[in-house]
Amino acid sequence: MKLNSLVKNIVQDKSNVSDININNICTNSKDVGRGSLFVAINGINNDGHDYINEAVENGASAVISNGRDVGKLPIPNVKVSNTRLAVSRVAAEFYNYPSREIKIIGITGTNGKTTTASLVYAILKSANYKAAQIGTLGVIADDYEINNTLTTPDPITLHKILRDLSDNNFTHVVMEVSSHALDQLRVSDIDFDISVFTNLSNEHLDYHNDMETYFKAKSKLFRMMPITSTSIINIDDEYGKKMKLESSAPVISISMKNKSDIYFERVNYSLKGLNGMIGAGNEKIEFNSKLIGEFNAENIISAASVGIALNINSKDIENGINSAKVINGRMEIFKTKNKKNIVIDYAHTPDSYLKVLSTLKNLIDEKNKIHVLFGCGGDRDNSKRNKMGKIAADFAEKLWITPDNPRFENIDKINLEITKGLDKKKYEIFHDREVGLMTALSKIKSGDILAVLGKGRERFQDVKGNKIKYSDIEIIEKFL
C-alpha cells in the first residue's frame, strides 16, 4: 500500500506525505526489512524512538513517530500525537478493516474470559458457523495453526489474523479483550458486534494503580460499541451496574440471582458438573455441563446470552454448552485410587480464590477437608498477597505455600506478605514447589480436596529472568 493512503486517517495534511510503497508494518526494529513502515511506540520498558536509526539501517522505508526530535532521517517521518493509536489505525487500513467482514464478539472482565470465550466458540460450532477463538489459549480455529499469544494480540498481529480468517471464510470470531489491550489501544479499530462484561475484581493494580482506573480501562470496550451492536453485562457484579451506564450500545442484563433480561430459573451444582435452565423471555435453555462451580454458571449464562443475541436456536446453544470441555488449567479435577481429589486452577486473584474455594466447600462432604497449595507471583501487585493468604486460610485445613513465578523478587519476602497474621500451625512453607506438592499429595486423606492454585497448566517457573521447566500437571500425573 502507498504510504499516503496508509496514513490518511492519522494525519490532517497528506500533501507532504510520500507515496512510496509499504509492504509491512513493524513496531520492533528487529522485524524491519526493506519496505517496512516502522512505528515507534513508547512502551513500558523501551521507547521505540530510541530504535529508529536501527530500523532505518534494517531497511525501513518510512517511520511514524510522536514528534520527538530524532534528527534528520533519510526516509519519510510521519509525526502524530499518539503512535499507539496510529499503529492501530494503519494496521486496520493495511489489512483493509477485516473486523467489518466478520461478527466479532469481545469478552472482558477479570475472571471468566477464557471459559466464556470457549463456551461461545462451542455454541457457534454447534450452530455450524465457521468460527474462531482468540485469547489466552492462542488462536483456535479449524485448519488454522494454533499460536500462544498475549490474551489480546498487538494490533498488527490481530488485524493480520482477522484478515486471514476473513479470507478463509470465517464468519464469527470470539476474542478475549484484556484491560491492557484496551488501555494500550490494541483494539481501537476493531468493529465489535457484541461485547460481554463478566466481572471486575482486584487484579492488575501493579499496572492500573487503582480499581477506578482499572474500571475505566475496561469500560473503553463498552463506550466504543456502535448503537447497532449489543452489550451483555453481568449486573450481579457491583461494577456491572456501573458498566451498564457506560455502554453506548443497547444492554442485555444477565443475573444469577434476579429476574433480569436473562437469568437462571434453576441451577444445580456437583463435583460432576452443572445442570439447570436459563430463562430469556419465553425462551428456555436447559443445560447439563461438565464444568463445575458457581463462577462457571456465570460463564455459561454469559455464553448463552451471546447465543441468544446472535439469534442462535436454543437447541444449538444447549448442545454447545453441553459439549464444551473443561478448559485446561481451570477447575480440572483428578482423583486418586484412594479417592483423594486434586483440583488444578489458574486462580491468582483474591476474587478467584474466593470463587474456587467457596465452590469446593459447597461440593465436599462436611467430614472432608480442603487443603490449598499456592504462592504469589513476584514483581506484581503485592496488595493481594495477604488477602489471598487469608481467604485460603478461611477455607483450608492446611496451606502449602510454594513458589509461583517469583521473578526477580525475594521468595521469603513474598511468603512473609502471604502469611502475615496467619496462624503458624496453619501453613507450611516450601522453597521448591515440587517438594511441596508431593508432600501435600501424600498427606491429604481419602475424600479430601487439594486445590493447587495459580499455575494451571503453565510449564515453567519464572525465576530471575529464567524460564525453568516445571509443571504441576506432570507432578500430579507422576503421583497418580
Image (spheres, grey):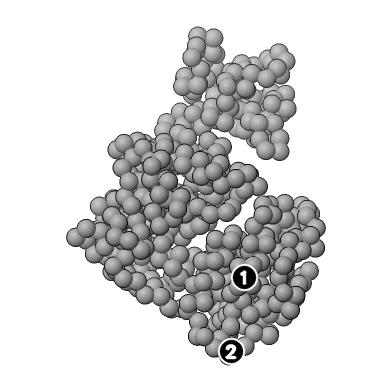
Image quadrant in which you'd find residue 45: top right
Classify mark 1: residues with Cα within 10 Å, few (<14), some (14-19) or many (20+).
Answer: many
Does the residue at mark 2 contact the one at mark 1 (Cβ under 8 Å)? Answer: no
Residue at x-position 78% and y-position 55%: 409
Residue at the image position 58 percent from the left and 27 percent from the top: 83
Screen quadrant of the C terminus: bottom right
Q: Quadrant of residue 202?
A: bottom right
Q: Residues within 10 Å of mark 2 (few under 14, many from 20)?
A: some
Question: How many marks overall?
Answer: 2
Extreme residue in the front direction: 421
Q: Which residue type carries mark 2?
A: Ser
Could you say where residue 290 lies in the image, as x and y percent from the top left? 42, 72
Disc 1 target residue: 392
Q: Position of residue 187 (x, y in %)?
A: 48, 38
- The front one of 3 and 404 is 404
Question: Pointer 2: what residue?
Answer: 446
Query: Which residue is at a point 54% across and 43% down the rendered structure image?
Result: 212
Res 71 seen here: yes
Q: Position of residue 64 (x, y in %)?
A: 60, 23
Placement of 25 over or under 440, stated as above or below? above
Q: Residue furthest left?
A: 282
Report whether 408 appears left or right of 107.
Answer: right
Q: Which mark is residue 114?
A: none
Is 335 placed above or below 290 here?
below
